[in-house]
Amino acid sequence: MGKTDSRARPSFELERVEIELSGGPIAGIDEAGRGPWAGPVVAAAVILDPGRIPNGIDDSKALDAEVREVLYQRIVETSRWGVGIADVARIDRDNILNATMWAMAEAVAALGDAPRLALIDGNKAPRLACASRTIVKGDAKCLSIAAASIVAKVTRDRMLIALARAHPEYGFDRHKGYGTPEHQAAVARHGLTPHHRRSWKPTQLALGLLEAE
């Protein structure tokens, strides 16, 4: 017999209470790509339609790629959503936290009309034209944030898969820019692409700007 997944799943309870108390719409916000050596950080904002919530939404990290793709399509077809993308130049110039906050604000702006409340994964919120609330591990607790995590992850993964076609020797389609042994070996062999974050310690080591400890 296989293992039973007994962890708690994200729910729409917080959004439902907020809508009943103060009205909506309520947006969930999450990002993908804060840790990789290469590629952008992508944020998404999603306003779920309470009457048309797709089944199976979960923290993107708990889903395999095929399931994420299916849910992504269902979410974008039934919800209001927006995406913000902070490229490598912005990450290197502003640092990853500020670039992430900027991408989140861009995702909310892409919704058009601002939501009444934004629920944000983590413990820091960008400056928004609406009320906001941070929720640590919100993608595992709050359905709107979980939906945003799926949209952000699929959007970024598609970008890295496209990047792999331009730079097939790096394996971006497999590691998505994270510092895997395969990625480390590719950087050692081929150097850096314009899509690598030069403010990251591993890439600075590769450029010879730092000495290995």
Image: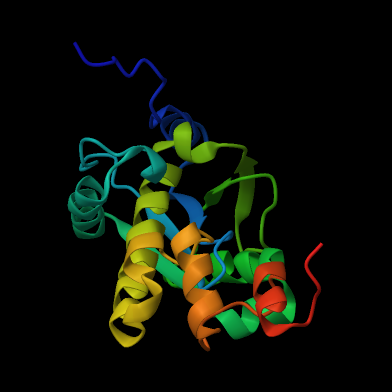
Whether residue 39 is visible to the viewer of this picture, yes or no, is: no
- Answer left or right for 121 relative to 27: right
Pick out the residue farthest to the front: 189
Picture quarter with the C terminus: bottom right
Question: Measuring 36% from the left and 47% from the top, which residue is drawn there?
Answer: 147
Question: Measuring 28% from the left and 55% from the top, which residue is drawn there?
Answer: 79
Q: Which residue is nearer to you in this view: 6 or 16?
A: 6
Question: Measuring 46% from the left and 42% from the top, which residue is drawn there?
Answer: 23
Q: Which residue is nearer to you in this view: 79 or 198?
A: 198
Quarter of image, res 1: top left
Residue 31: x %, y % from top left: 50, 57
For the rendered model, the colour scheme is: rainbow
Q: Which residue is nearer to you in this view: 24 or 59?
A: 59
Residue 154: x %, y % from top left: 32, 60
Residue 103: x %, y % from top left: 55, 70
Q: How many marks?
A: 0
Q: Which residue is nearer to you in this view: 51 or 154?
A: 154
Question: Measuring 32% from the left and 80% from the top, which residue is drawn there?
Answer: 168
Quarter of image, res 192: bottom right
- Answer left or right for 52 relative to 108: left
Quarter of image, res 96: bottom right
Whether residue 193 is visible to the viewer of this picture, yes or no, is: yes
- Answer left or right for 205 relative to 140: right
